Image (tube, grey):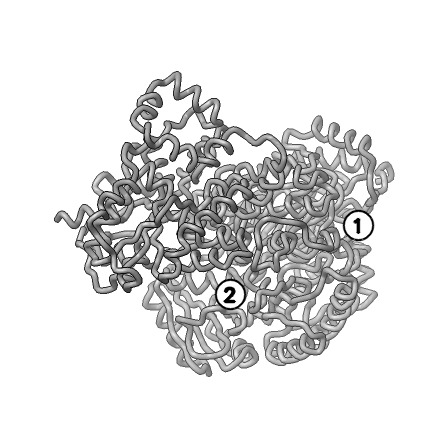
Amino acid sequence: MAEQRQVRRGGRDRRETGGLARALTRAVRGDVDFTAAARALMTMDASNYRRVPVGVVAPRDAEDVAAALEVCRRYGVPVVPRGAGTSIAGQATGIGVVLDFTRHLDAVVEVDAEARTAVVQPGVVLDTLRDAVRPHGLTFGPDPSTHSRCTLGGMIGNNSCGAHSVAWGTTADNIHGLSVVTYGGTELRLGQGWEGAPAGLRELVDRNLALLRTGYPKGLPRRISGYALDALLPEKGVDLARAFCGSEGTLGVLTEASVRLVEAPRARALAVLGYADESAAAEAAPGLLAYRPLTVEGMAEDLVRDVRGLPRGGAWLFVETGGDTAAEARARAAELVRAADALDGTVVDDPAGMRALWRVREDAAGTATRTADGGEAWPGWEDCAVPPARLGAYLRDFRALLAQHGLRGTPYGHFGDGCIHVRIDFDLMSAEGVRGFRRFSEEVAELVVAHGGSLSGEHGDGQARAELLPRMYGDELVGLFGRFKDVWDPAGGMNPGMLARPDRLDANLRFSVLPKEPVEVAFGYPHDGGDFGVAVRRCVGVAKCRVAGPSSGSDVMCPSFRATGEEAHSTRGRARLLHEMLAGEVVTDGWRSEEVRDALDLCLSCKGCRSDCPVGVDMATYKAEFLHHHYAGRLRPASHYVMGRLPVWLRAAAPYARVVNALARVRPLAALAKQLGGIAPERALPVLAPVTFRRWLQDHMRDRTGVLADSRTAVLWPDTFTDHLSPSVGRAAVRVMEAAGMGIVLPPGQVCCGLTYVSTGQLDQARAVLRHTLDTVEPLLELGVPVVVLEPSCAATLRTDVPELLTDDPRAARLAASVRTFAQALEECAPDWAPPRLDRHVAGQTHCHQHAVLGDEADRRLRERAGLIGELSGGCCGLAGNFGFEKGHYGVSVACAEDQLLPAVRAAGEGAEVLADGFSCRTQLEQLEGRRARHLAEALAEGLDG
């Protein structure tokens, strides 16, 4: 140990950092990245804290870990192990070198179904492990709400728990053995007994047996705070692996874990119990444990935005039961409803219904970051735990303390274990607000201790609570924590500032580096007070966007991450880079930043995050904003001039459509056009319509007159794609609308939603186009009739981008409010119309913009009435307007299509009706799969012919 250089926590000059990077590159086979982008992506986790690393290493194996540690030890640089970065207390941030285990060390090494164990690497995602053991009827018991992206290494580091801990305990309860490398280079195998213990640990424990026996609170199923030194008591079996769990990367680096598995119930049901208020629900929870439920989760009405489908009450318990059969699981749930002293109760046992209810609970980590009036709320005091019998009293006192400090929060969580999550509307932007944050944290710590509780009940102490541990454990035991760390890590190289000798809870706050005044922007950001910085800090890091593909369900976010697996191509990664761009410390070029540009380059502007992100991050808008500033006064990529101004070129080419199509069939000319236009060479150029839809509709309507302002009249919007590239969709829609008895009004002049200008960040041009459009349609807006937009991407642009770009023009909001999809218009204007029965199975995809902005409920109902059976897939087609046509995007575009769309269409077979309302989706299917998809209007129009 004597030859180790003492770890330095301060700054390093560029020469020393460069030497470290070169030494690491020579030593490890994995990835070494010291670029500004890599560092920026790792400055934050899901907490309030920010620490800037010097570089990132993604080791390929345990040998790489040992080699990286040897180099860092030689240079005196600290190390921080990191999984998915979803920690809420700051322990996944760090100075020095971050070891990212999510890239390579992410395998399930072995499953022993008979012994009910599995061997995993630290970067394996929990759901990956659960999928691997599901065929054996097994699962891993602990399941945090981030189960789709959190890693086993992170769960072990934090001793994570999840909703099912009342049945299966914490992560520490489910660990068999751990392989660890210390900062000093010692490889250890930790299990039960003293074998593998670092030198001096047994002596330290033997000298402090009395303190270890009396210093920990009793009766706490969720005592996560501090080091679990009492696991080393002889009467507890000396469990070294258990003592390592929850050490937050401060003792050593985990390279492999042997975990225990439990038998998964064959069937499950959910008893949903309604109570008068949160305290009543909390006081009822302990009484339900005798029925051996799988979960006892609680939340109050101030968390749930939509209480439809929930029993009567002001708070609810979600109590899950299991059984060998569906009838047995339901019977147990029904027994709970009868036995519970609840105002009301119901049993849900259909999988879709249970998923919908659990999604409310799992998304709470994000939804709770916004108060009911849209204000911001932060983790700060996220997950304390008290004995379950004390929870009702604690919640009353906690609410009173919030009110005393003028704060608001929405508690929810694991009522059966006495563990509460809450986000609080701290003011972390001003010096006085930060002082208030500290005062509240100190007082609430005293309150938790007074109720016999633990400062952390799930997520660990990190920087948020470690400073307060003396209030819970006393100075003597906390002093022992420091000596315990020193036995493992005498040089102090492992995650300094956490747990032992911690940083102050009000230091390193991630908001302090942001601009104090709003930056000048083009969009209005109405949900963020017009402040781009507020919009960017919406991302709290829960990383729902980091779910790897192929995905399931209807979610869209985040197609580029699913395609690449790279943090920079996730919604969170892009938000982090924008945060660092505004901070100006790591990313120093502001709007001219190439790091941000490169990360946003693979953003498809699918808008999926707008609906799927629990906090409503809107990366499509942020991308357009960034491109607007990035290219201001500079030459743009060729694709921006070609595809970004597509409406102009299509209108110019319309009179010569046949000639243009003939020239496009000449391969050398087509290749040259694609090269000059920045178009991917793999793409076929779309065919122009010889007769535009607008021209056809003018001829069609010459002898027809709609009854203006009649309840069955609608404006039919001739969007660019329908007008010039797929007029058959428009003609079909007219046939169906007329068959339904609807009158049709055509805008009197050229109109455009500005989509292509917005998606390429040409916002000045977009505003000019939109003002002309509003001038054109203003007389129609006076009629108060629906505006039917057949292309979902254009409809979404009119609904959201137009009013957010033209905040000073009330006509923009009126137009947005008038927009309807084809199905919505039929339902609104012709509610009694019976569509033709088609009676066939469907496949295809709900357009990503429709999913995110417009919703597809009306489409589902219309398909059902027409006898179109089955569900459309979620995800994004990958073409996404100009994205999939741009040079360099083809591979990612195809990968996105392979996530959900193409597999769904292949599985449906040749006889299915392939539906895709978006021009991009139809083009992608035709070019990649050779399948012709149709707009719903086309299928219904064909049905009119019998």
Image location of residue 355, percent across then percent down: 41, 60
Left or right position of 291 against 73? left
Residue beneath the point at 39% across and 61% down: 782
Left or right position of 658 against 623? left
Q: Residue at label 2?
A: 167
Type of residue at label 1?
Answer: Val
Q: Residue furthest right?
A: 2
Image location of residue 518, percent across then percent down: 68, 54
Front residue of 821 and 607: 821
Q: Earlier in the sequence, mark 1 or mark 2?
A: 2
Type of residue at label 2?
Answer: Ala
Residue beneath the point at 66% across and 56% down: 47
Residue beneath the point at 54% across and 81% down: 280
* Residue 860, disc: none
Q: Quadrant of residue 595?
A: top right
Could you classify mark 1 by the number of other residues whose Cα lies within 10 Å: few (under 14), some (14-19), or many (20 or more)? Answer: some
Q: Quadrant of residue 593?
A: top right
Quick check: can you spot residue 215? no
Q: Residue furthest top?
A: 668
Image location of residue 769, percent across then percent down: 48, 44
Callout 1 secondary element: helix
Residue beneath the point at 37% across and 60% down: 352
CA gap between label 1 and label 2 equals 34 Å
Q: Residue at label 1?
A: 487
The relative height of residue 505 versus residue 52 in the rendered view (above or below) is below
Image location of residue 839, percent across then percent down: 18, 52
The relative height of residue 327 versus residue 911 in the rendered view (above or below) is below
Quick check: can you spot residue 333? yes
